[in-house]
Each structure stands twice: as structure tokens, then as C-alpha cells.
Image: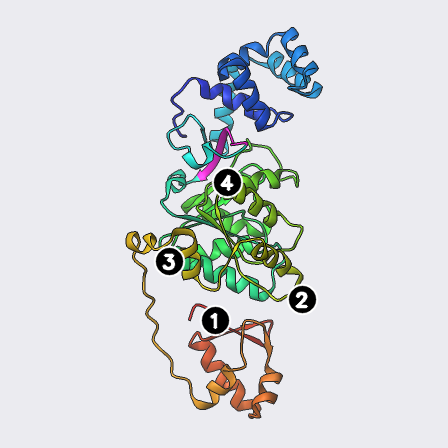
Amino acid sequence: MTDIKREESKYILWLNHLRTINHPTIHKLIKLFGNEEEVYINLQDHDILDHLVETKVIKEETKDEILFELEDSDIDSWYAAHFTELAKRSINVITYLSDEFPDKLKVIHDNPVALYYRGDIGLLSSEHIVAVIGTRRPTIYGREVAEHFARELADRGIVIVSGLAAGIDTYSHNGAISAGGKTIGVLGGSVDICYPRNNFKIYNEMCKNHLVISEYPPGVAPLSMNFPMRNRIISGISDGVLVVEAGMRSGTIITSDRALEQGKVICAIPGRIDDVQSQGTNYLIRSGAFSVCSVDDVICDIYGDAFNKKVSEKVKKHSRYTLTEEEAKIYSHITLEPVYIDDLIRVNNLSVSGTIAALSRMERAGIIKKVNNSYYIKNLDY
């Protein structure tokens, strides 16, 4: 459990655990009363509570929740019980008064007052952090690109942050892990709740060897209304944001908007004009985001030339595979859009057995990948 050094932190955590109060209101109350302890003291006065409701600083339901909480226990009893619960769930916490709390988050609009976490909190202090985000329903192209870019960025020492959601988020985290790099997941619910459940394997790996964080205390379900707020943290801890695929109305666009408000660089991978999942990325590019086609583009746009002076790029050494004339003919028709084996046989006018043998050799060499049974795509990592 992270040692919270300052007495005020217990008041911050108490305010943060209230379900009917948001972060702007917490900051408003602290500004109004001077510090966190004074907020707690003044909230015990019924007349002050009534005044806060009348002046619309807090809601009536917040007043009711505060009265219930204050009647239930005093601050020290609550604080002790809270940390007992955190220990039981293997959760750690820092507040904005903690040394480990990243400076980047202290300056964003509606900055979180606390971060609950599992894993290595030191990753928040990494020199280079890039968000790789996108749709929950990616195309095969989007999945391959997200994993490739995340892997290549992580291979150069950049920490990858995403939302641990289905789709592009999952492939971004996977790419970083497969490169032996580090990755951060920002959740829209408590850090002890894996959502979606299908991501439990990667979630468990990240809790042990990477970092999973949330501003929500234990017991908060990943409700849809939490995710837009979660997105400001993803962009907040990042130096820049890479959008792989996104629809026009999506959390990805919300994250990009938050990033722009925070003065962060936005990079987007262009997509086909008739693809629904590329409408968001193409819109971002039209609106001024950097259009990127390689990892070098991303690094240059976010960090400039200074990056290569600080971080040496790892050079991948493949045992190069020389294509035969027949394989080269087949390979020329394979892209990141899945190509059916029968189409490859037809356009190349090759025998079935010869085509299958050539595809098998190229697959073993890692030049291409088989997807959806008899469909093939290029391997971007070769």
C-alpha cells in the first residue's frame, strides 16, 4: 500500500468515495473552504449544507448522502475501514498530494483527486507515453495496425496507454506486451473489476507486470457514463494520442477532444472513405490531426527529432526470406485486407497445390498471416 504522507489525503479519499459528487464539485468545495479538512468540517454543519444546496454547489441527493455517511462513522474510522478494504482487494491508492501522482494530471481540467491502481505506479512517471486508441469493433486491418504500431512504439521504449476495452484497446495493450514493453490501462470502473470479462488474461498480466489505474474506488461498476470521464485521464497522462480506427460518434473522438483541450498532439491513421470505422480518423485528419503511415511518423509528430537523441531505436533482425518467383507473384496480391485463397489461385493462374505450398512457406517465414481459415494478410511486423 502506497504511503500517503499528508493528513489531508484521508479527506480527499472520503470526498472521492461519495457517489453523488463529481470532481469539479470537489475542487469547488476545496477552493470555497480553503483545504480538504475544512471541507469535511463544514459539511457537518446542516445550515452550511442547506446553503450549498440552495446555491447549487451541491445537489440535494449529495446532501442526503453526506448526512448518511457522517452519521455512519467518523473520518478516522472510515479511513481505517477503507484501507482495510483496499488491502483485501489488493488495491493501492495515491492522491494528488502523493509524490507518485503525475504532474501531467494535476494541470488538466477536472483533474482526478485520487488514483486507485494495481501494478507498477512508477510507469506514470515514464519519460515517453503514447495513447493508442480506437473503436471497439475494429476491422482486421485496424487490429493488425494497432498491434503493429503499439509493438513498434513499445520496442523503442515508449509506454503504451489505452482503456483496456474490447477492440483497438486490447490490440494496443497486446502489442506493447508482445514487444516486451510496458503498458497502462485506464478503467471506467474499479480496478478490481475486469471489463470486458474476455480481457481477463491481459488484465491479469497488466495488474502483475504493468499498470491498471482508475479514479473510482472499489465497488464502482464500469458504467457507460464513467467512460467519457475516464478518457481525459488517458489523454492526460500521454504525450500524444494515436487514433487507429474510430466512428464519428465514439469515445475515441471524445478522448481526442480532451487531448486537444490539454494541448496534446493527435495522430490518426487514414482509412478508406467508405469505411464507417474510418470516418472518425479521416475527420480528425481534416480537422488538423497529423496523418501518419508509420511509427516514425508518430514519433516525429509527437516528439520531434529530439526523441532519437534520447532513445536508441532497437533494430529488428529478421532472418531474411527470399521469395521465389511464384511466391513473389502471390505476395504482390496480399495486403492488410484479407484475400481469399481461391482469389489468389485465380489471379495468379497457379495450381492449387503450388499456391497452398507457397502460402504455407510464407506463413512459416512470418511474411504473411492466415486469418479466418482460408484468408491471408500481410504481416506488418516482418
Q: Amino acid at mark 3?
A: Asp
Instruction: Evaluate if marks 3 and 2 touch, with contact meaning CB atoms under 8 Å apart.
Output: no
Q: Which residue is mark 3?
A: 155
Residue 381 place in picture, x, y as percent: 43, 68
Q: Which mark is residue 355?
A: none
Q: Which mark is residue 274?
A: 2
Closest to the observer: 125 or 192? 125
Q: Residues within 10 Å of mark 1 (few under 14, many from 20)?
A: some
Query: Mark 2 vs mark 4: which is more N-terminal?
Result: 4
Query: Mark 4 vs mark 1: which is more N-terminal?
Result: 4
| In this picture, residue 380 sits left or right of residue 256 | left
Closest to the observer: 258 or 132? 258
Q: Which residue is mark 4?
A: 262
Q: Nearer the viewer, mark 3 or mark 2?
A: 2
Q: Which residues are magenta?
A: 110-118
Question: How far apart are the two marked residues, 2 and 1, measured between alpha carbons?
Answer: 24 Å
